[in-house]
Image (tube, grey):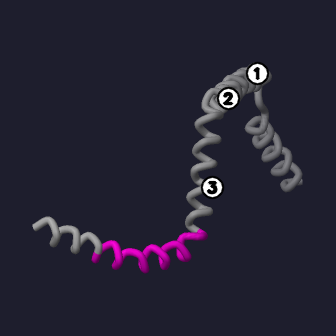
Amino acid sequence: MRTLLRMLFTTELAAPSLYIDPNTGGMLFQLLAVFLALFSGILFFFSRQIRTAFSRLKRLLQRGQTEPEQATSTNEKAPDQANHQSEASDNQG
């Protein structure tokens, strides 16, 4: 009997915390609808800038994958350019 009363009272006390008033639910739905419309409007308004940013990021990532090959070729050219610049400065002075 005691466990039956305990189950009855705990169920009665727990049930109201799960209840959402219909007016509160409607207000929450209206707020969510406004935020959804705001978010979709921002995405629509800035869609060109977002696409540009993602394409730049994609290009940077692709360059990052091919960069080690380019780095060795630019390192080989760098000493020649340094010698050419030092010879040019010697000829001027």
Identify the magenta region.
65-83
Look at label 3 and name its amino acid: Lys
Q: Say which element carries label 3.
A: helix
Look at label 1 and name its amino acid: Gly
| Residue for badge 3 | 58
| Residue for badge 2 | 44
Q: State the mark number for residue 26.
A: 1
At 65% across and 34% down in the image, what residue appears?
47
Residue 80 x, y percent position in the rendering: 35, 77
Tell me the distance, in whole angstroms, between the alpha carbons under discs 3 and 1: 43 Å
Residue 2 x, y percent position in the rendering: 84, 54
Query: Which residue is most to the front?
Result: 91
If the image is split into quadrants, where does the C terminus sit? bottom left
Tell me the distance, in whole angstroms, between the alpha carbons under discs 3 and 2: 21 Å
Look at label 2 and name its amino acid: Phe
Q: Nearer the viewer, mark 3 or mark 2?
A: 3
Q: Nearer the viewer, mark 3 or mark 1?
A: 3
Q: Name the N-terminal-most of marks 3 and 1.
A: 1
Query: Quick check: 76 above or below 85?
Result: below
Q: Say which element carries label 1.
A: helix
Tell me the distance, in whole angstroms, between the alpha carbons under discs 2 and 1: 27 Å
